[in-house]
Amino acid sequence: MENATLQKFRFVLDGREYFVRDENELALVFELLALTGKAGKYQWDVICSLDDDLLKIMETHHGLMRCARHLSNKNRSLLFLKIADNFSKVIPNATVFARLLASMPEEIDQEKFVKNARRKGLVAIVGKPSELGKVLEWATPAVERQILGYLEPSFVRSLIASSKDIYEILYFIHAKNKRYFCEMIGWDFICERTFSAEDFFCALKAVDIEDDETFFSWFEPEKIRSLIANERSFHAFLMKLSFTKQDPLLRFLSYDPHEFNAIG
């Protein structure tokens, strides 16, 4: 049986027959075509001609990124579509996914990329909150919702052990989507995952400023006071909050912000 590394894959360009053996040679073809005045059309024709063979050619994320570097947004989207069935093999982790997403400034290209990844591809690279944060970091607001929609609330909740994990995700989400995320996993769920003062302050730091009151409504002031070990730790937590969040918190705990800060 012929060794896969020696196998040649045929494509036709301008009526002439050419061959590539692997992803590195294909990247070289795209690079050379990028130097011509007709790169867009020629690259498209190469991808269409190779078609299903791309599943055999494209084996690593290094090769994929090298190829993508020389393609237009339109041709890059076509390449991603052709190798969608190999997504988990070619894009093995959240960091690689984020790097590819960051290379796409146009929202429509990000949407197509995520659509090709499907739920199966996203679940394969997201196993903890920090990985979900990476996946969302370079997404546009609309694509953030697309990704979260594919993952679904039950899967996202399964990643979260405490409110500190929520912070690791919310930190990377656009302000306009913070409430969407909180409502998706449930304010009650956020409350249930608050086991310590640090959990509480991490969650408060992460939620959108306009959602402070919604967040506070799930807690009793007495419970929060009981979680805080002493005044020193309370001040340490306060220092990590913006003034726009400090004042609502102090009022929630029955302090006068002006008097409290004057004393402090």
Image: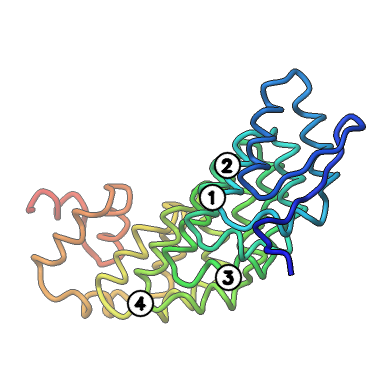
Q: CA distance from mark 1 to mark 2?
A: 6 Å
Which mark sits nearer the N-terminus, 3 or 1? 1
Q: Are marks 1 and 2 in contact (CB under 8 Å)?
A: yes
Which mark sits nearer the N-terminus, 3 or 2? 2
Which of the numbered marks, if any, corresponds to residue 124? Answer: 3
Mark 3 or mark 1: which is in front? 1
Q: CA distance from mark 4 to mark 3?
A: 28 Å
- Residue 133 appears at what percent x and percent y? 46, 59
In the rendered image, which residue does mark 4 sit on? Answer: 194
Element marked by disc 2: helix
Q: Check the image and report above or below for 105 versus 148.
A: above
Q: CA distance from mark 4 to mark 2?
A: 44 Å
In this orientation, which residue lies closer to the viewer: 175 or 213?
A: 175
- Residue 170 appears at what percent x and percent y? 45, 58
In the rendered image, which residue does mark 2 sit on? Answer: 66
Please state the total of marks drawn on the protein image.
Answer: 4
Q: Amino acid at mark 2?
A: Arg
Q: CA distance from mark 3 to mark 1?
A: 18 Å
Which of the numbered marks, if any, corresponds to residue 62? Answer: 1
Dot 2 crowding, Cα within 10 Å, few <14, some 14–19, many 20+: some
Q: Amino acid at mark 3?
A: Ala
Q: Residue at x 35, y 62 (%)?
A: 204
Q: Amino acid at mark 4?
A: Thr
Q: Check the image and report above or below for 231 versus 245.
A: below
Mark 3 or mark 2: which is in front? 2
Q: Amino acid at mark 1?
A: His
Element marked by disc 3: helix
Q: Residue at x 59, y 37 (%)?
A: 69
Dot 3 crowding, Cα within 10 Å, few <14, some 14–19, many 20+: some
